[in-house]
Amino acid sequence: MSDVLDEFDDEAEESGRSALFYLKILSLVVLVVGFGLYIGDVLFGKSSLDVLLNLQADKDTLTSKIKSLKDENAVLQKEYFELRQLDPDR
């Protein structure tokens, strides 16, 4: 009878090791998938690098448009003062 119990204990210990091994593998798979999802969100999500670069390009475009509009405004303002016969240099 003792031999049967010893075999049962060995099998239980082996199945415990097997369960621990599968738990470690499952934890590793969940960790890798989670990290992959995080990297995917960083690269392709709402706060991605592509969005950041597009926003910087839009900022540069708007900055140059503001400068051109200011220059155009200065020219039109000078023309307005000349039409009203005021001295634009004062």
Image (tube, rainbow, N blue to C red):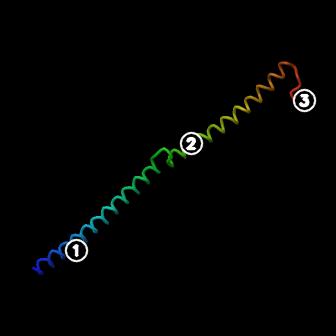
On the rendered structure, is 79 left or right of 62? right
- Disc on res. 28: none
**Residue 19's quadrant in the figure?**
bottom left
Q: Position of residue 71 (x, y in %)?
A: 74, 33
Quadrant including the N terminus: bottom left
Mark 3 lies on a secondary structure that is: loop
On the rendered structure, is 76 left or right of 48? right
Up/down of 2 relative to 45, above or below: below
Give me the C-alpha separation between circle 1 and circle 2: 59 Å
User: Hey, what amino acid is under mark 1?
Assistant: Glu
Q: Is tag 3's residue or tag 1's residue first in the polypeptide sequence?
A: 1
Q: Residue at x 14, y 77 (%)?
A: 5
Q: Nearer the viewer, mark 1 or mark 2?
A: 1
User: Hey, what amino acid is under mark 3?
Assistant: Arg
Give me the C-alpha separation between circle 3 and circle 1: 97 Å
- Disc on res. 13: 1
Up/down of 4 relative to 47, above or below: below
User: Hey, what amino acid is under mark 2?
Assistant: Leu
Give me the C-alpha separation between circle 2 and circle 3: 41 Å
Residue at the disc numbered 3: 90
Mark 2 crowdedness (10 Å alpha carbons): few <14, some 14-19, many ≥20? few
